[in-house]
Image (spheres, rainbow, N blue to C red):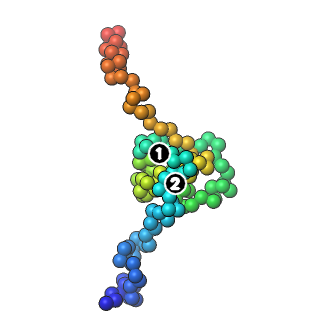
Amino acid sequence: MNEDSPGGGPSVPGSQWYDADAGPLVRPYAMTGGRTKPGPSNVRFDLIALVVVDDDPPGPAEESLLGPEHRSLLALCRAETQSVAELSADADLPVGVVRVLLGDLLESGFVRVSRPVPPTQLPDERILREVIDGLRAL
């Protein structure tokens, strides 16, 4: 049984996976070239890691070699410093895809990533309370 598509002709196999308004679906593995890990160094991007465009990025010729998703992430980073989670939401891409694409941009020298401070390196809460109490006593 062959159902007609909204355009009036026979439906194309697989067309039930998207509607006419959304257009064809690009699978995440197509955006990352089948990769699931960011770059050859396997850098792990925390969701709250901040991404900023490098002070001395490669030139426009190198940027023109990037894919559309890479350029979209760069444009978002140029507008303002954003976390990995914010980039994922603003670019409307899965976090895993954003991590792989950021790995490419980091390896190419387009962006810098500041990793969050691990909880073990944060000051002890007891010390902070003593400082606050000391300031209040002044």
Mark 1 or 2: in front is 1
From the image, which quarter does the N terminus lie in?
bottom left
Q: Is residue 83 above or below residue 17?
A: above
Q: In this view, does 121 lie above or below 98?
A: above
Q: Hey, which quadrant is residue 66 in on the image? A: bottom right
* Sooner in the amino-acid sequence: mark 1 or mark 2: 1
Q: Identity of the amino acid at label 1?
A: Arg
Which residue is the extreme one toward the top? 138
For residue 3, the mark is none
Q: Hey, which quadrant is residue 62 in on the image? A: bottom right
Q: Identity of the amino acid at label 2?
A: Leu
- Secondary structure beneath dot 2 equals helix
- Secondary structure beneath dot 1 equals loop
Q: Where is residue 18 in the image (x, y as percent from the top left)?
A: 38, 73
Asked if disc 1 and disc 2 are in contact, CB closer than 8 Å, the reply is no
Name which residue lies at 47% across and 63% down: 29
Q: Can residue 138 be seen at all in this image of the molecule?
A: yes
From the image, which quarter does the C terminus lie in?
top left
- Crowding at dot 2, Cα within 10 Å, few <14 / some 14-19 / many 20+, comes out as many
Q: Can residue 81 be seen at all in this image of the molecule?
A: no
Name which residue lies at 51% across and 45% down: 43
Name which residue lies at 42% across and 33% down: 118
Q: Where is residue 123 in the image (x, y as percent from the top left)?
A: 39, 24
Q: Name the residue under label 1.
A: 44
Q: Position of residue 121 (x, y in %)?
A: 42, 27
Q: In this view, does 87 lie above or below 136?
A: below
Q: Is residue 136 rendered to the left or right of residue 59?
A: left
**Distance from Cα at disc 1 to Cα at disc 2:** 12 Å
Name which residue lies at 57% across and 61% down: 67
For residue 101, the mark is 2
